[in-house]
């Protein structure tokens, strides 16, 4: 998919160098996640690996954020609704400068703020998540509030009473779409015509106990979202250029929310984890860890070449 | 005879007044605004009022988002659904995630009367009280509603605010200045303490009158905040009177009675505690006051519990044990 040719803010347009760099970052995040989950002997690899390019595209290109001022009123908000991919979010926030990278090995350790699922004590985490299904409705409320304009007056913000330019991005899992509250939020976002809300679904096709198609069939998924009055795009979620263009195009949608169905592979990057629900949760043993590490490092070397 | 005032009208008016004072106050409903009178807010502030339809989880979630954008959301649905369907996002986002959302739980206890047990909220205090970080408040009358709601708005963090659907007896005059977290002593007495919340506070006062005719002096406390409990007021009652009776429109398990009994037992205060409420059962459809009487929540029941507790109280003055 090409970038939109419309009259849009050019700062969102990306170069081939951007794409290559973001792909390299995504692979770095996968390595972080693998080490964190191995170190904790607990966590979720498959759904973090599938979303690595999406999260890297957001944090290294698309989101308007300032790690030095995490609470900047005008910032874009990212909500990880599929909270079990917490290791991916923590790794991205650390590598983006919200907190020290050397804190990552404390993931899920007693006494660390890097709790099992996203915790608001971690700089850059907007809302807690984990119990699945709440991202769309929480994101809708946030988008409503930002549109109403209640930004606290500060040197960095528009005067109080002006709507924030901040936009809201929510990352969902496809298994998560089983939850009824997702569709309550989807209807609410459409009712209030929230053009400042973008949902990205990490459609990796696999959930905890098997294929999404077996556990609870979702297709035709694009038609479902269209029927709920959302703007819909479908992309290859591992194609960074396609993800960036889709995000860019989603921002151009006015007066209704936009969803990007990102088709991905569960466990992407480690051959024996791909497509396999047994790597949804749980930590690798030493042997599997070494194999996974070698594959991911090989992938990273390819991007760094 | 005391007057009666409609609680939901008092709520709707108080919410509207908050909205006029603070532009950050917004309100949400799960399509019950004509029931709890939150429509009064919506009519004047349509841009600050959101009806998400019959979707209680979504109701709380949208409020969470609004709160994180700097607003003060007041969420409106029936108490029974707030403390059941909407519970998980309340636990996750309001409590664990420290989000400043105010839960307006109208139709408390058996006040939805004719709707029957599916609509009665008889476990909500127990549920909400057990959530870390949650504050639980319930006004006894319209005057208390007007006094407490602005404090709820100003209180840091989530509040569960529980109020009756019906016309309830006026307990307080204009002098009443309650504070969240503090019991209000309405009447002093040295024999027994009656601790009431919500509609049953008026019945505690009636019970105190009944007891007075039998020579028993009852202290009456309004425990409009159930959490954090005013432990000093409870422990004073345990020291200075010989029995404590709690009265609430709720199951006797886990509510005000549970909170008081836990405290008294834990500090070894040694006074008998009797809990007035539904005795671990559902009510039925019927008139409000008739059902309160039928299910053991009459002034006579409260007075009888006081007399029984005093008669059974084994505690002797320390000096007489030898």
Image (spheres, rainbow, N blue to C red):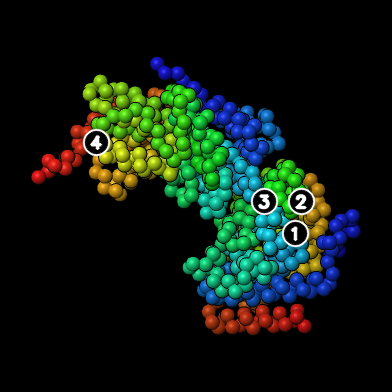
Q: Residues within 10 Å of mark 4 (few under 14, many from 20)?
A: many
Occupied quadrant, residue B238 = top left
Q: Chain of mark 3?
A: A
In the drawing, what numbered circle is on residue B242? 4
Q: Chain of mark 4?
A: B
Under circle 3, the secondary element is helix
Query: Where is mark 1, residue-wise?
Result: A64
Nearer to me, B34 or B204: B204
Q: Earlier in the sequence, mark 1 or mark 3?
A: 1
Q: Residues within 10 Å of mark 2 (few under 14, many from 20)?
A: some
1 or 3: mark nearer the eye: 1
> Which residue does the image show at 74% across and 67% down from the upper left?
A60
Asked if badges 2 and 4 are on one and the same chain, I answer no
| Badge 1 vs badge 4, beta-carbon distance below 8 Å | no
Q: Earlier in the sequence, mark 2 or mark 3?
A: 3
In the drawing, what numbered circle is on residue A139? 3
* Alpha carbon separation for disc pair 2 and 3: 15 Å
Q: Chain of mark 2?
A: A
**B192 sits left or right of B256 in the view:** left
> Which residue does the image show at 35% across and 39% down from the upper left?
B233
Asked if badges 1 and 3 are on one and the same chain, I answer yes
Q: Residues within 10 Å of mark 1 (few under 14, many from 20)?
A: some
**Residue A219 shows in the view:** no
């Amino acid at each position: 998919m090409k970038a939109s040719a419309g009259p849009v803010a050019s700062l969102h347009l990306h170069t081939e160098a951007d794409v290559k760099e973001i792909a390299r970052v995504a692979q770095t995040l996968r390595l972080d996640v693998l080490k964190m989950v191995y170190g904790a002997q607990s966590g979720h690899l498959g759904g973090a690996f599938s979303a690595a390019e999406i999260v890297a595209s957001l944090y290294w290109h698309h989101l308007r954020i300032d790690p030095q001022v995490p609470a900047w009123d005008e910032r874009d908000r990212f909500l990880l609704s599929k909270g079990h991919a917490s290791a991916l979010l923590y790794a991205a926030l650390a590598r983006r400068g919200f907190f020290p990278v050397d804190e990552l090995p404390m993931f899920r350790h007693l006494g660390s703020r890097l709790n099992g699922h996203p915790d608001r004590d971690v700089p850059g985490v907007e809302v807690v998540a984990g119990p699945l299904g709440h991202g769309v409705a929480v994101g809708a409320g946030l988008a409503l509030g930002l549109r109403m304009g209640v930004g606290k007056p500060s040197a960095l913000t528009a005067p109080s009473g002006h709507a924030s330019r901040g936009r809201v991005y929510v990352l969902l899992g496809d298994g998560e779409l089983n939850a009824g509250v997702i569709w309550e939020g989807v209807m609410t976002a459409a009712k209030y015509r929230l053009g400042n809300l973008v949902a990205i679904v990490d459609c990796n096709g696999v959930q905890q106990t098997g294929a999404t198609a077996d556990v609870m069939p979702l297709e035709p998924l694009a038609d479902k979202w269209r029927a709920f009055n959302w703007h819909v795009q479908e992309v290859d979620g591992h194609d960074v250029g396609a993800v960036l263009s889709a995000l860019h195009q989603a921002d151009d949608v006015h007066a209704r929310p936009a969803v990007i169905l990102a088709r991905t592979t569960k466990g992407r990057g480690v051959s024996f984890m791909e497509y396999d629900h047994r790597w949804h949760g749980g930590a690798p043993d030493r042997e599997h860890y070494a194999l996974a590490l070698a594959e991911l490092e090989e992938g990273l070397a390819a991007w760094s070449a | 005879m005391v007057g009666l005032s409609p609680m939901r009208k008092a709520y709707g008016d108080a919410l509207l007044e908050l909205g006029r004072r603070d532009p950050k106050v917004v309100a949400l409903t799960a399509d019950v605004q004509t029931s709890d009178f939150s429509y009064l807010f919506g009519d004047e502030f349509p841009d600050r009022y959101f009806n998400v339809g019959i979707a209680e989880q979504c109701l709380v979630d949208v409020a969470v988002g609004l709160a994180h954008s700097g607003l003060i959301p007041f969420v409106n649905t029936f108490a029974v659904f707030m403390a059941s369907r909407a519970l998980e996002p309340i636990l996750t986002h309001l409590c664990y995630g420290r989000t400043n959302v105010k839960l307006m739980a109208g139709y408390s206890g058996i006040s939805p009367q004719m709707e029957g047990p599916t609509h009665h909220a008889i476990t909500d205090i127990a549920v909400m009280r057990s959530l870390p970080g949650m504050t639980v408040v319930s006004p006894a009358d319209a005057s208390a509603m007007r006094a407490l709601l602005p404090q709820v708005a100003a209180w840091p963090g989530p509040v569960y605010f529980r109020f009756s659907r019906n016309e309830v007896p006026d307990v307080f005059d204009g002098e009443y200045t309650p504070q969240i977290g503090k019991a209000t002593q309405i009447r002093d007495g040295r024999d027994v303490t009656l601790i009431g919340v919500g509609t049953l506070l008026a019945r505690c006062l009636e019970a105190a009158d009944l007891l007075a005719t039998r020579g028993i002096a009852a202290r009456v406390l309004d425990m409009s905040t159930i959490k954090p409990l005013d432990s000093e007021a409870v422990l004073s009652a345990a020291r200075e009177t010989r029995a404590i009776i709690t009265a609430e429109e709720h199951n006797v398990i886990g509510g005000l009675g549970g909170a008081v009994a836990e405290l008294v037992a834990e500090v070894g205060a040694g006074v008998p505690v009797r809990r007035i409420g539904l005795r671990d059962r559902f009510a039925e459809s019927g008139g409000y006051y008739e059902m309160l009487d039928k299910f053991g929540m009459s002034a006579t029941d409260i007075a009888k519990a006081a007399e029984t507790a005093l008669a059974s109280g084994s505690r002797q003055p320390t000096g007489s044990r030898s």
